Amino acid sequence: MIDSNQTLGHVAASHPVSTLVFLRHRLDFCCGGGQRLAEACQRAGLDPEAVIKEIETAETARASERWDTRSLPDLIDFILGAYHAPLRVDLPALLEAARRVERVHEKKSSCPRGLAALLAQLADELEQHMTKEEQILFPAIREGRGGGAVRMPIRVMMQEHDDHGENLRRMRELATGFEPPPEACATWRALYAGLQKLEADLMEHIHLENNILFPRASTG
């Protein structure tokens, strides 16, 4: 049963399909996972009961993985395979597409100037972030070194997640909500579609760490 006083992070963890609803309504369940559902809906001009109903309806139609009930090593394996590996493939391709769009369409007023530079920054920061997780934090969690042994690196990772969230907001702004203008070429349209998927995947990625992996590891 979903209660509007529960946090977005709690709802996302216990009702995984809710993340699709939150994405649709632009409710920040990853970096902003500590917000109560009622408060987040109020700020967004949404009826929390309608959002809860939407989640419950979606839940009956789709079975989703409950990562809050799986082992931490299983969750780490999933994060590495579903998010870390694809990011290293997808981001360079999106960066190249953004550079091409800016180069070819630089004279158009609708050109997303600055988008390529932002994606280059995001790619660099994400690579450093993922490397720290893979070389330091994740091995410690796998070895059962939870609690105080991992709280400091977790705090660092969560601060970096906030920075990633700010970059995502800037990316959406530069890409005009991922709505290509009428004059957009095929590369431009593919770029915006890819960025929209990147945003959704990165928010899911951060949610799994902030709201499930890190809290469980910190209390271990």
Image: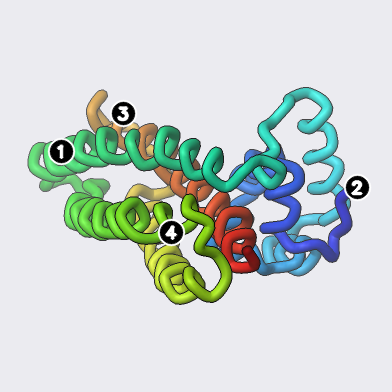
Disc 4, SS: helix
Look at mark 1 in the image and give the residue it sits on. 96
Of callouts 4 and 1, the N-terminal one: 1
- Give the percent coordinates (x, y) of residue 58: 77, 31
Distance from disc 1 to disc 3, alpha carbons, whole Å, reads: 12 Å
Give the side of residue 197 with respect to residue 26, left or right: left
Which quadrant, please, contains the C terminus?
A: bottom right
Instruction: Identify the amino acid type marked 3.
Output: Ala
Distance from disc 3 to disc 4, alpha carbons, whole Å, reads: 39 Å
Instruction: Identify the amino acid type marked 4.
Output: Ala
Instruction: Identify the amino acid type marked 2.
Output: Met
Of callouts 3 and 4, the N-terminal one: 4
Look at mark 4 in the image and give the residue it sits on. 140
Q: Nearer the viewer, residue 153 or 145?
A: 145
Q: Residue at x 40, y 40 (%)?
A: 80
**Image height of 38 relative to 126, above or below:** below
Instruction: Identify the amino acid type marked 1.
Output: Glu
Q: Residues within 10 Å of mark 2 (few under 14, many from 20)?
A: few
User: Which label lies toward us, 1 or 3?
Assistant: 1
Of callouts 4 and 2, the N-terminal one: 2
Q: Residues within 10 Å of mark 3 (few under 14, many from 20)?
A: some
Give the side of residue 186 with respect to residue 152, left or right: left
Q: Residue at x 53, y 54 (%)?
A: 209
Look at mark 3 in the image and give the residue it sits on. 190
Image mark for residue 1? 2
Give the side of residue 37 with respect to residue 129, left or right: right
- Give the percent coordinates (x, y) of residue 28: 59, 58
Disc 3, SS: helix
Q: Nearer the viewer, residue 142 or 101?
A: 142
Distance from disc 3 to disc 2, alpha carbons, whole Å, reads: 39 Å
